[in-house]
Image (spheres, rainbow, N blue to C red):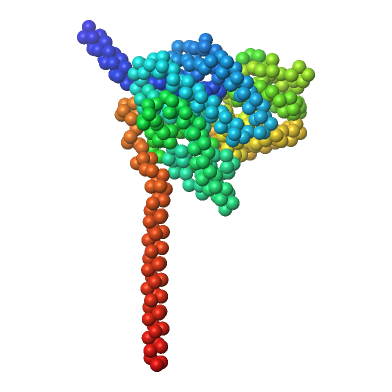
Amino acid sequence: MVERSRFILLAFVAVLLTSLESAKILTIGLIGGSHYLLFDEISHVLHESGHDVNMLVQIGTPRIKGLSYTGRNNSYRITPWSASDEYLYNYNKWFLEQQTLFLQGRETLSGYLDFIGHLALQCEWILGDIDLMNSLTGEHFDIAVIDAFNPCTFLVAEKLSLQFVAVHSGNFWNGNQIGLPSPPSYVPVYRSLLTDRMDFWGRLKNSMMFLSSFVVEGMIQARFERAIKARFPAGSEPSLSELYRRAELIMYNTDFSIEFPRPLLPNVVYIGGLLSKPAKPVSQELEDFILAAGESGFVVVTLGSMLSSVNMLAVLREMNTAFSQLPQVVIWRHVHHHWPSDVRPAPNVKLVDWLPQNDLLGHPKARLLVTHGGHNSLMEAVYHGVPVIGIPLFGDQFDNMVRVEAKGLGVTIQVNQLHARGFSQAMATVIGDKRYKASTLALSRVHRSHPFPPGQRLVRWVDHIVQLGGGEHLRAFGLQLPWYQEYLIDVILFLLATISLATYIVTKVLRIAVGCLRRGGKVKEA
């Protein structure tokens, strides 16, 4: 009886300790596509570790359809928010037009700024939704975990007076924005298309783009000025530049199996590979299709969750013709009702509205991934050791593919240069050349051999911040310095002034001395 009472007491203490370690966490993901997939996984992992997680989700964006959306079963809670039906109709119509431009190789800075403008407008509405803000405030969250790609998530956390962990969905493209040491001599700037091994002209290009990146960032932040002024009290409007550096912890969805080595700060960690899992068996239908190819294996084709269909006939025809020339079978994610009726899919091609990408890449007969170059897809390819052909379309996908080529993981084909013959030859080369497979397996070993898997890193670091009430002990003091002190502009100007003054004094003294000597010589001659 005593032993039983002791056991009950110990069990009660264990439950009590577990409940004390549990935290109320708000995750904020206001964009669909791969950003939603990442934050869905983050929210689920934190929930599975014992935390009470609520995710603020914007309904109506690509990948998240309708107010009936409820998230994962038996997992984290969601708080949905949606713009008006009229706005969503116009926004999604505009986004479809942008997709068409991407497929023509016509991504532009103005188009990107227009997209940021949409995010800013949505942000103004979210911050102005009093019922939403009061509901979230009433939850009394301990901390927020936010999608750092969208500046609005910083403003929501600030509006709710929450400490936050900022998660960046891809590579270290904005290191200088958050105060990371980013020497232009070997840290490539976003969209520079450079590796970490630059010649003189590469360093010159990178330096010029490093300076211009501050101008572009200013243009992005300017889009949010109206929302900030409208939704925060006069005199206490937050600055996005300051909020970016105020994160208790900064996480990047990458790791150094695919990223170039670079300096990090103590409050910056990487959790790349959250979506990569041991493969589960695929459906019998897909398995039968794969078996029909024998030892040739199969190719996985997907251009990401935002572009689940190639809606340009010319590009689709070239891809379809190229696939028809392969001995492998092809599993291609393409929404059936978007497929043109006058194009017959190649005999070795199977079209699917959705595919289990992780499980297919983990299949022993997977030979190649044809991808847009999104970070989640590339991390899954690395995890399972599958080479890639990349067709980058927008954003960081171009830089991602530079890293893919530098690491020997695969090759890049620009969408406006995609022709059936060259595409088919590229796929045959990557599949047939054993060096690509060997490089990919080497990267997989690097990725998998990390002391802790990505999910553990996520949970342990968030727990660390929650338990200590913040990450001040990790934040470098330099993040609080004004820019002219951070980059030693005041010191450089002082040294230049000192050297100039010393040079002036020495020159003046020498002139006087020379003048005296000349006058003395004339007196002696007289």
Q: Residue at x 66, y 29 (%)?
A: 101
Inspect this view and state whether residue 190 appears: yes
> Seen in the image, is 250 located left or right of residue 445?
left
Inspect this view and state whether residue 456 appears: no
Instruction: Establish if 522 lies above or below 338.
Output: below
Residue ranking furthest to the bottom: 526
Front-most of residues 195 and 281: 195
Front-most of residues 200 and 496: 496
Front-most of residues 296 and 163: 163
Q: Residue at x 40, y 87 (%)?
A: 521
Residue ranking furthest to the top: 1
> Seen in the image, is 355 located left or right of residue 294?
left
Q: Residue at x 39, y 24 (%)?
A: 159
Give the x, y percent position of residue 523. 38, 89
Q: Quadrant of residue 524?
A: bottom left
Give the x, y percent position of residue 413. 67, 35
Instruction: Establish if 372 lies above or below 51.
Output: below
- Quadrant the C terminus occupies: bottom left
Front-most of residues 20 and 522: 522
**Circle count:** 0
- Quadrant the N terminus occupies: top left
> Seen in the image, is 454 located left or right of residue 309?
left
Give the x, y percent position of residue 253. 49, 31
Residue ranking furthest to the right: 342
Q: Residue at x 41, y 16 (%)?
A: 130
> Seen in the image, is 506 located left or right of residue 309?
left
Give the x, y percent position of residue 247. 39, 32
